[in-house]
Image (cartoon, rainbow, N blue to C red):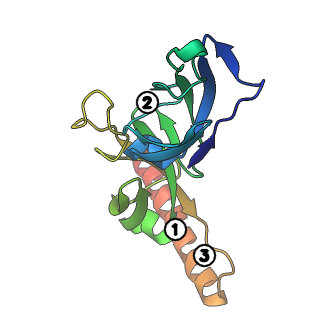
Amino acid sequence: VEVQVTRHPIFQRQDMNIFSTAPITFAQAALGGDVKISTVDGDVLYTVKPGTQTDTKIRLKGKGNPGFNGGEAGDLLLKVNIQPKPGYERNGMDVYTTTEIPFTTAVFGGEAKVSTLYGDVICRIPEGAQTGRKIRLKGKGIVSMKNPSVHGDQYVTIRIQVPQDLSPEAKEKLREFQQVCRNDERKRRGSVA
């Protein structure tokens, strides 16, 4: 990500400091990384710490307006603005995503590939999973800025894919399944009474 900083009236000026915002990607905020910042004096490479949050302040000493009469240059003060990442939501150190699973995986259980900030993982889906169920992926969230050995979690919400454009044979099998389920329900109600 490249941030352009120029002398412009839109910047607030206090003493010789320049105030601006620094947009960074969701991944840079979560994992850290280098951001190229173009200042009035040229480009500066700044390393964003893993776990950076929106509104974090970055001070680049001496990169503001030049000092008067040989005085010290002001600082460039940047306020971090994290750009959204489609499909990801952040709350503190935790990350929230959604994954779609086939109807049959919801019924019988199985596995689903889930994307995390650290790459794809295989997640176990329990038998009878319902839409809206959350699965916790421990340690797959955002790293703590204060303690790099501490990570948040990723919470994956399951959404079941409803089959479409079924063949006549598949429709017939589902109707049989529906009838068996109705009969089972009637038996349960009869045994409870």
From the top left corner, tell me how far across and down residue 18 is, in percent. 61, 22
Which residue is denoted by mark 3 in the rendering?
175
Amino acid type, label 1: Phe
Residue visible at 57% across and 37% down? 41
From the top left corner, tell me how far across and down residue 45 is, in percent. 45, 44
Q: Closer to the N terminus: mark 3 or mark 1?
A: 1
Please state which of the two labelled residues, at mark 1 or mark 2, is closer to the viewer: 2
Residue 162 against residue 14 in the figure, above or below: below
Residue 13 against residue 63 in the figure, above or below: above
Residue furthest top in the image: 15
Q: Closer to the N terminus: mark 1 or mark 2?
A: 2
Q: Residues within 10 Å of mark 2 (few under 14, many from 20)?
A: few
Q: Which mark is residue 92?
A: 2
Amino acid type, label 2: Gly
Residue contact between numbered discs 1 and 2, judged by CB atoms under 8 Å: no
From the top left corner, tell me how far across and down residue 32 is, in percent. 39, 44
Front position in the image: 160 or 173: 160
* Residue 92 visible somewhere in the drawing: yes
Front position in the image: 75 or 119: 75
Q: Secondary structure at mark 2?
A: loop
Q: Closer to the N terminus: mark 2 or mark 3?
A: 2
Q: Residues within 10 Å of mark 1 (few under 14, many from 20)?
A: some
Q: What is the C-alpha distance between the residues marked 3 and 1?
A: 15 Å
Q: Secondary structure at mark 3?
A: helix
From the top left corner, tell me how far across and down residue 14 is, in percent. 63, 11
Please state which of the two labelled residues, at mark 3 or mark 1, is closer to the viewer: 1
Q: Which mark is residue 103?
A: 1
Amino acid type, label 3: Arg
Please state which of the two labelled residues, at mark 2 or mark 3, is closer to the viewer: 2
Residue visible at 29% across and 38% down? 151
Q: Residues within 10 Å of mark 3 (few under 14, many from 20)?
A: few
